[in-house]
Image (cartoon, rainbow, N blue to C red):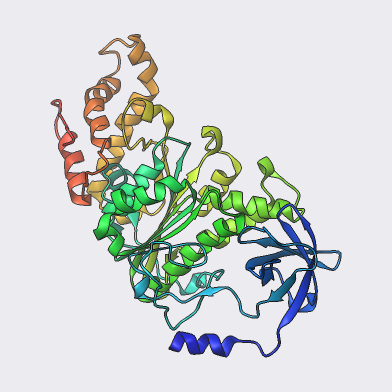
């Protein structure tokens, strides 16, 4: 009832109307009360059959509003009526959203009926809390994955990126994190992904127990660019709602690259000049606005963000990956060469880093990780010579030690999809491997 009263109170006394004057591709040009419109305003455009299609104003040109649709433009032509919505796009989250699957408009798509709305509206595009009012990032988060728990330890409120090319296993790693991470609530955004994978992710990866504490936002690759972009905004708004309830929220988004591609489509359609690899300037302006919304709040709640990034052509320095890496608090790098050797998850721990890790580890844990990294780096430098048989054992004691420990360390980093490992167990296993000079066999069950 409170949500209904809030909506009634937001209704405008005057309605503004416009008319469609041109359609080019997906771009709808509307003439009308431009003084009442702004970038981001919503219009309800009615086609010849009287059906409503929601559009968003993305720019202005020649005294016309440039609009992109959230749905198909079938039946819309010159002269069709466009009604301006007076309210800003927002959502009314509540605990009833837990266990549900929604689209970018916040509408349920799981066949379980309507969702009870909350009393407080949350704007889809909001600003993060002021930097000086936020709590500090502190306290380890158990991700349930050995390689990440030990070598890239994550803290509550931290934002991490998972960087990988196509087919390397980032979605599988994300499913392991969704199932095993210790948190109060999960908000999962599947942005521009394959429609086939949605049901598989919900049933196989999350399962009934995981879904009960989660909200899943879905916008598949075949949906309009505005829907894909809004799904990312909705994911963050839902996470902010639960954070404000003093919950520790895990916000996962797969993937930020699809959000950037959607923003590029929108920018190009409005006439923005393409810059780095065709990406428009607004892409790099929107990325920090989205990603900065994750993190610790002003109270005890926090949003721990895990964002996947699809690197184009396995180039980890391509524009989107480089921009995202500079915004986040750490990055997890997955490499195709490791996956081709059959070791999953294919995380290259030498190229991965957590910026909060030095402050959250004990001195003993930091020393253990430093020694393991040194051994792996030494082996990595000499790997080609060792595989070719060009290295003679006994030539270098450090290389001999690295060769001795490499099989056990490589097995330690491997983990099956349905396997979980706690923080303490991971450090104990690594200490056991490096504890003496005898060969250690680490088998994953």
- On the image, the x and y values in percent for residue 157 come to 39, 62
The x and y percentages for residue 164 are 46, 39
Along the line of sight, the residue nearer the viewer: 236 or 48: 48
282 above or below 93? above
Q: Quadrant of the C terminus?
A: top left
Residue 274 seen in the current view: yes
The quarter holding residue 65 reads bottom right
- Evaluate whether residue 354 shows in this view: no
Q: Where's residue 41, x and y in %?
A: 67, 72
Place residue 24 in its image quadrant: bottom right
Left or right: residue 53 compared with residue 180: right
Residue at image location 53% in from the left, 85% down from the top: 7
Q: Is residue 151 above or below residue 389?
A: below
- The residue that appears at 46% across and 77% down in the rendered structure is 92
Q: Residue furthest right?
A: 62
* Nearer-the-camera pick, 271 or 129: 271
- Name the residue: 42% across, 80% down: 118
């Amino acid at each position: 009832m409170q949500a209904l009263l809030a909506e009634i109170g937001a209704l405008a006394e005057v309605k503004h109307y416009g008319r469609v004057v041109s359609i080019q591709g997906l771009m709808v040009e509307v003439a009308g009360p431009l003084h009442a419109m702004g970038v981001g305003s919503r219009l309800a455009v009615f086609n010849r059959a009287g059906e409503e299609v929601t559009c968003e104003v993305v720019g202005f040109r020649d005294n016309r509003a440039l609009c992109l649709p959230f749905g198909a433009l079938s039946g819309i032509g010159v002269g069709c009526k466009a009604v301006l919505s007076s309210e800003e796009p927002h959502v009314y989250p509540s605990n009833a959203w837990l266990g549900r699957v929604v689209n970018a408009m916040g509408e349920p798509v799981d066949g379980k009926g309507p969702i009870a709305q909350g009393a407080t509206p949350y704007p889809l595009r909001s600003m993060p809390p002021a930097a000086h009012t936020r709590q500090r990032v502190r306290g380890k988060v158990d991700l349930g994955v050995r390689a990440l728990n030990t070598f890239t330890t994550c803290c509550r409120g931290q934002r991490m990126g998972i960087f990988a090319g196509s087919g390397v296993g980032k979605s599988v790693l994300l499913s392991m994190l969704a199932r095993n991470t210790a948190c109060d609530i999960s908000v999962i955004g599947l942005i521009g992904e394959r429609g086939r994978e949605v049901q598989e992710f919900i049933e196989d990866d999350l399962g009934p127990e995981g879904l009960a504490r989660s909200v899943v936002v879905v916008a598949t690759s075949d949906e309009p660019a505005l829907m894909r972009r809004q799904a990312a905004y909705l994911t963050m708004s839902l996470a902010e709602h639960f954070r404000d309830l003093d919950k520790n929220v895990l916000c996962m988004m797969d993937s930020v690259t699809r959000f950037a591609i959607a923003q590029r489509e929108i920018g190009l359609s409005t006439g923005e000049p393409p810059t780095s690899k065709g990406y428009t300037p607004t892409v790099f302006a929107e990325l920090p606005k989205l990603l900065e919304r994750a993190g610790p709040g002003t109270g005890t709640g926090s949003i721990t963000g895990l964002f996947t990034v699809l690197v184009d052509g396995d180039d980890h320095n391509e524009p989107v990956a480089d921009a995202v890496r500079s915004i986040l608090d750490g990055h997890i790098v997955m490499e195709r060469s490791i996956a081709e050797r059959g070791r999953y998850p294919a995380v290259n721990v030498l190229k991965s880093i957590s910026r909060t890790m030095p402050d959250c580890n004990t001195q003993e844990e930091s020393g253990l990780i430093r020694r393991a990294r040194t051994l792996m780096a030494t082996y990595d430098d000499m790997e080609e010579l060792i595989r070719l048989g060009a290295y003679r054992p006994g030539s270098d004691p450090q290389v001999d030690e690295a060769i001795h420990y490499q099989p056990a360390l490589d097995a330690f980093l491997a983990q099956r999809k349905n396997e979980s490992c706690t923080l303490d167990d991971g450090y104990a296993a690594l200490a056991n491997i490096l504890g003496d000079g005898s060969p250690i066999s680490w088998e994953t069950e």
